[in-house]
Amino acid sequence: MGMKEVGIGIIGGGLMGREMASAFARWCALTDVAVKPRLVAVADLVEPVREWFRCIPSCEQLTADYHELLANPAVDVVYVAVPHNLHEKIYLDVLNAGKDLFAEKPFGIDLTAARTIRDAAAKSGRFVRCSSEFPFFPGAQRVMEVAKSGKIGRILQVVSGFHHSSDLDASKPANWKRFSRTCGEIGVLGDLGMHACHIPLRLGWRPSSLFAQLQKGYPQRPDGKGGMTDCDTWDNAMLHCWTEIESQSVPMRLEMKRLAPGETNSWFIEVLGTEGGARYNTKEPKTLWLFEGGKEQFWKKTDLGFGMPFKAVTGGIFEPGFPDIIQQMWAAFLMEREGLLDGRFGCATPDEAVATQEIFAAALESQRDGTVVRL
Ligand SMILES: NC(=O)c1ccc[n+]([C@@H]2O[C@H](COP(=O)([O-])OP(=O)(O)OC[C@H]3O[C@@H](n4cnc5c(N)ncnc54)[C@H](O)[C@@H]3O)[C@@H](O)[C@H]2O)c1
């Protein structure tokens, strides 16, 4: 098809590193992109993690030392998916090596790190974006369209969130996400917050003030070696915000939970106005709810198909899933990098990533002092 190939290096081949590799491996699913990722190198400290990437024929470099990957001239773009305490150092090393960067959220362990990375990205002139895939679901795109349509009257409330129950199992051994030193004091905010904040921020709905309710999870978990270890991160966060929409103050709730009973992995957004509104939840991945105001009020429900921002061979009636939105996000990253986004939804920018960290820092302050914090 004569698609331009872009050499990709992955630093951190764990959960997300492998997910990205599999999205590249079925790139033939996309029919209207002019760019093709070619995974050429992977750096991970753990040998069995590196070995998995032998199933990708183009991946010629497997190394424990990411500096070797950064010295590889075949690598144009580096995707980094490592624990949060390593973001700043590795992201800056990527930029200093003259590579473009697709960074995982939360874009540094705290606000200071996020600002340092944003400033270095701007100075470097490299193309830098931050991972946030859920807005690529057709249902999420439709909620954004409704929100921007000007047809739903005065917006009365916004709810955006992400609920897991992954931490409800007290017998699950601790990993780096359970410790402030590796996940950040922001805990669940850093883990799930970008997902809850991305669409509101893209719509221009930055919180002007917020009150946070943060809850911790189990104070101890198995350490995976027969003992127990202390866990100290926030697990649930409810942020009650005010935001300004068309000169009106509007209540906006941002919810991030790793202890949400009954929720396996539910990302959701709801925008309600006086005359209309929309609601989408990945729990029902093809279902879009539309509200119609009037003398009689209606909630209408429809089954969406595969109406992705980037067209695919997948039939229009089929359901989209997590691997699809990951692939769409990469299409957006690579097409925007070529200047070919053409008005489609682009990945989270460094400024948006910093804005999420400003929200998280305000949430920590609100929780600590029990006060409403202005941003
Ligand atoms: N976008 C999403 O939906 C999503 C989902 C989960 C995680 N994440 C983010 O992805 C990042 C990684 O999370 P994960 O769940 O994949 O973690 P993970 O623990 O599964 O994988 C991290 C990998 O990094 C490797 N690593 C650690 N230090 C390294 C170093 N110095 N050099 C090379 N490799 C090193 C580890 O060996 C491990 O394999 C985090 O920023 C997290 O917030 C994003």
Image (cartoon, rainbow, N blue to C red):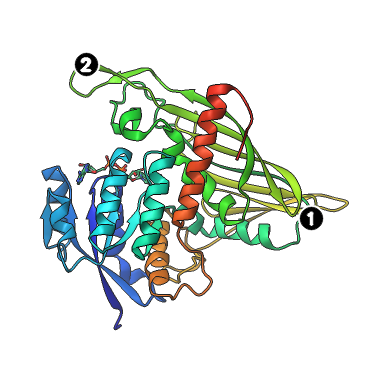
SS for tag 2? loop
- Identify which residue is drawn at 61% across, 48% down: 206
Tell which of 136 and 206 is nearer to you. Answer: 206
| Amino acid beneath label 2 | Gly
Q: Is 247 left, or right, of 348 in this rendering?
A: right
Per the rendering, the mark at residue 153 is 1
Spot occupied by residue 171 in the image (x, y as percentages of width and height): 32, 21
Q: Amino acid at mark 1?
A: Gly
Can you give x and y, in whole percent of width and height, for residue 195 in the image?
48, 46
Q: Quadrant of the C terminus?
A: top right
> Does residue 226 appear anywhere in the picture?
yes
Residue that carries the numbered disc 2 in the rendered image: 227
| Residue for point 36% across, 66% down | 125
Residue in the picture at 12% in, 55% down: 62
Of marks 2 and 1, which one's residue comes earlier in the chain? 1
Tell me if residue 227 comes above or below residue 155 in the rendering. above
Most extreme residue toward the bottom is 2
